[in-house]
Image (tube, rainbow, N blue to C red):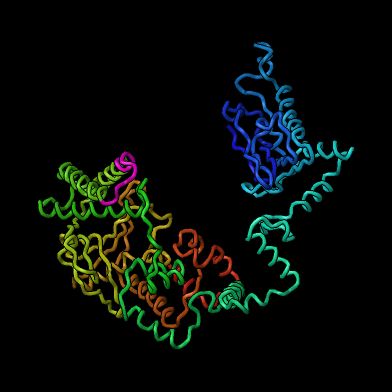
Amino acid sequence: MRKLPVALTSVLTLAAAAGALALPAEAQSRRGPEPRRYGRVYIASIDEARGRSFDVVFLPGLAEGLFPRKVMEDPLLLDIYRERVAGSLATQTERVRQERLLLHRAVAAASRRLVFSYPRIDVAQSRPRVPSLYALEILRAALGRLPELRAFEKRAADGAQSRLDWPAPREHKYAIDDAEYDLVSLDQALKRGSVRYLVEVNPTLGRSLRARAWRWKGKWTYADGLVDPDDATLAALAQDKLTARSYSPSSLQQYAACPYRFLLQAIHQLRPREAPVALEQMDPLTRGALFHAVQRELFMELRSAGLLPVNRQRLSGIRDSADRVLNRVAAQYEDDLAPAIPRVWSSEVEEIRADLHGWLGQLAVSDDGWLPIHFELAFGLTRDARRDPASSESEAVLASGVRLRGSIDLVERHSTRGTLRVIDHKTGKSPERPPVWVGGGAALQPLLYALSAEAVLGAGVELAQLSYCTQRGNYQKVDVPVTAQTRERIGRVLDIVSSAIDEGFLPAAPQAGACSLCDYRCVCGPHEELRTKRKKGDRLDALQDLRNMP
């Protein structure tokens, strides 16, 4: 059954696009509304109003394609065959007649006044609509002539005072609620130029309007984020320098996406408010946390059993161990999260099981002399029994004085060279353009984890790796060699971020597409990318250099 477009009116509103609906008996026999002091309102389909009389009838939806609806033959039983089978089967002629009969019934229900309307815009497709022939025929019956289409559309536009961009009438007497009344007052005040009193009596409104105007100008101002702060703000910002407090590598990656996002997330540490909701489907964060927990416990169990490294000979037994660990960890997560649909949860756990088996198979094939030695090696974080025993509560301090905190998924040592390799496991989709050094500032974790491991363990790191552990990531591995050149690159990145904090220049300058996935979009609004294009770009040269680093 097609959904009926319904609008609330004063006496009777007919769902004009309802067509010839087969109504249930209770709908056909339902009683009208009880009498009230100001009259009664009855909302119904055209068939439900059959045989009734009303003072005023409102008939919405007289647009092309809505009413009359497009009449089409039944593709399973064409009209030529319908005529041969039985004369009682409806054909195209009968369908057109029934559609026109609906119009006759709607018009006949009005005893004093008929008001019909049509939507001028198709909101779903963002295109204009035109009135249907039925709307023109009603006017021809009333005026004795067929009006011109443009004249008809102008008359309809004059009669419809509300618009999509201004949902209010032109006069106070037509307002139906407080919001429409206030909009009418504001519209009239704007036309007279007498709204200055609003910003005078409400300083907050004035500040908001001025900031909004400044954000669209070509000059960087205070309204664009943290821009050219005063001495007091710079003094407060000094405690947030990279050498004064610790940052996680993932938070430093936010700077390349948008400096203002970095300010809100990493410096001010603002987070969206978490609201408890029923877990119907495993979200990416939950999936990643579960996968990492299974990897950590599996590696620790394999180390205790002497089954590392993973190779072809041990693969079968290791997969059995992975199944047991996954069952145990998934049961704990299920008890904590209480998923709404257990069957969906079980299905997603089985998907993780398939990813685990595939990942272990990849490890067995690439038996290249690397032996896992540390799992969840944390630094700058509170001590936790689930982390590696070699973890340190002290921050990792780099040679430049930058302080870091975080947790490295896996650290391996080469059996012959004795050098280290740090691995960051990913459960998402692998990038179309894998990072060479820093990936435009979006892939700082490999190199920063490598430098942190050197500071914590006191041993040289030869290689940093991004390991995509799932079918979605195609089990891809991205190696970043830790050389003098890459150390210089990551040092340049840290200098750019550090200079931005020192200068107090952290504006809303998002990367292309960054706003669509940003938690702070409600703060900035949806048009920051467009505003940034209007700004003078010379102050973003360093940021652009960072984004251009492969």
Along the line of sight, the residue nearer the viewer: 520 or 362: 520
The residue positioned 45% from the left and 83% from the top of the image is: 503
Measured as percent of width and height from the top left, residue 169 is found at 71, 57
Measured as percent of width and height from the top left, residue 248 is found at 32, 69
Q: Residue furthest right?
A: 144
The residue positioned 67% from the left and 27% from the top of the image is: 72
Along the line of sight, the residue nearer the viewer: 433 or 133: 133
Main SS of the magenta part reads helix
Q: Quadrant of residue 66?
A: top right
Along the line of sight, the residue nearer the viewer: 159 or 251: 159
Q: Is residue 96 left or right of residue 29?
A: right
Q: Residue furthest left?
A: 305
The answer to whether residue 526 shows anywhere in this view is yes
Part of the protein shown in magenta: 336-346
The answer to whether residue 535 shows anywhere in this view is no
Measured as percent of width and height from the top left, residue 160 is found at 74, 52
Quadrant in which the C terminus is drawn: bottom left
The residue positioned 40% from the left and 75% from the top of the image is: 497
Along the line of sight, the residue nearer the viewer: 475 or 511: 511
Quadrant in which the N terminus is drawn: top right
Q: Quadrant of residue 439?
A: bottom left
Q: Is residue 206 left or right of residue 116?
A: left
- Does the magenta-highlighted stretch encompass residue 339? yes
Q: Residue furthest bottom?
A: 231
The residue positioned 60% from the left and 73% from the top of the image is: 209
- Does the magenta-highlighted stretch encompass residue 218? no
Measured as percent of width and height from the top left, residue 466 is found at 32, 58
